[in-house]
Image (tube, rainbow, N blue to C red):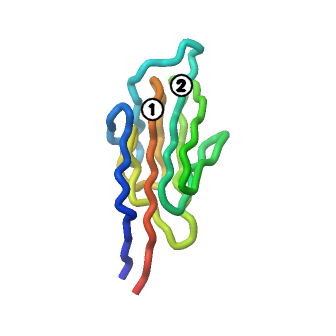
Amino acid sequence: MRILFSSGLLLLSAYGSMAAVAGQTATPAAPVAANGAVTATIVVSGQGTVKWNGGTCGPVATCTATLAPGKPVAFKAVPLRGAALVEWTGPCSGYAATCKVTPGGDFTLNARYGITSTR
């Protein structure tokens, strides 16, 4: 039996959430900065990291990334030993290993990890 324990943290997104499941891409609709760049805020809670082309965030960290608007980015959940991704919130939802986002403006992506145990 596999048991997944959640830390019970409440994660919030500045622009609400739009669901994206495997094979789909979410496009956050928020204003783009004057310089044309999009700021992604990545919040990682629990024992895992989030990786994307050009960066890594976590464990238990808040990071920012400057992205090009309209250019798809794949964020990959990488749990540490004994942990599992509980959920994505923000432009993606669910617990698939990869969250694909085509930024239309600034957004916040949350990855929450929990501890796994086998009995």
Above or below residue 113? Residue 16 is above
3 vs 58, nearest the viewer: 58
Neighbor class of circle 2 (other Cα within 10 Å; few <14, some 14-19, many 20+) is: many
Give the quarter of the image for residue 48: bottom right
Left or right of 93 in this view: 63: right
In the rendered image, the residue lying farthest to the right is 54
Horizontal and vertical percent position of residue 118 = 42, 82
Q: Secondary structure at mark 1?
A: strand
92 vs 42, nearest the viewer: 42
Q: Residue at x 53, y 25 (%)?
A: 38
Left or right of 114 in this view: 73: right
**Marks 2 and 1: in contact by CB < 8 Å?**
yes
Amino acid type assigned to the residue bearing label 2 in the image: Val
Q: Residue at x 40, y 60 (%)?
A: 86
Which numbered tag is attached to residue 107?
A: 1
Q: Residue at x 39, y 40 (%)?
A: 90
Q: Disc 1 versus disc 2: distance between alpha carbons?
A: 8 Å
In the rendered image, the residue lying farthest to the top is 34
- Quadrant holding the C terminus: bottom left
Neighbor class of circle 1 (other Cα within 10 Å; few <14, some 14-19, many 20+) is: many
Horizontal and vertical percent position of residue 29 = 38, 24
Which numbered tag is attached to residue 46?
A: none
Above or below residue 41? Residue 30 is above
Query: Which of the marked residues, 1 or 2, is nearer the chain's N terminus?
Result: 2
Circle 2 is placed at which residue position? 38
Amino acid type assigned to the residue bearing label 1 in the image: Phe
Horizontal and vertical percent position of residue 110 = 44, 46
Q: Secondary structure at mark 2?
A: strand
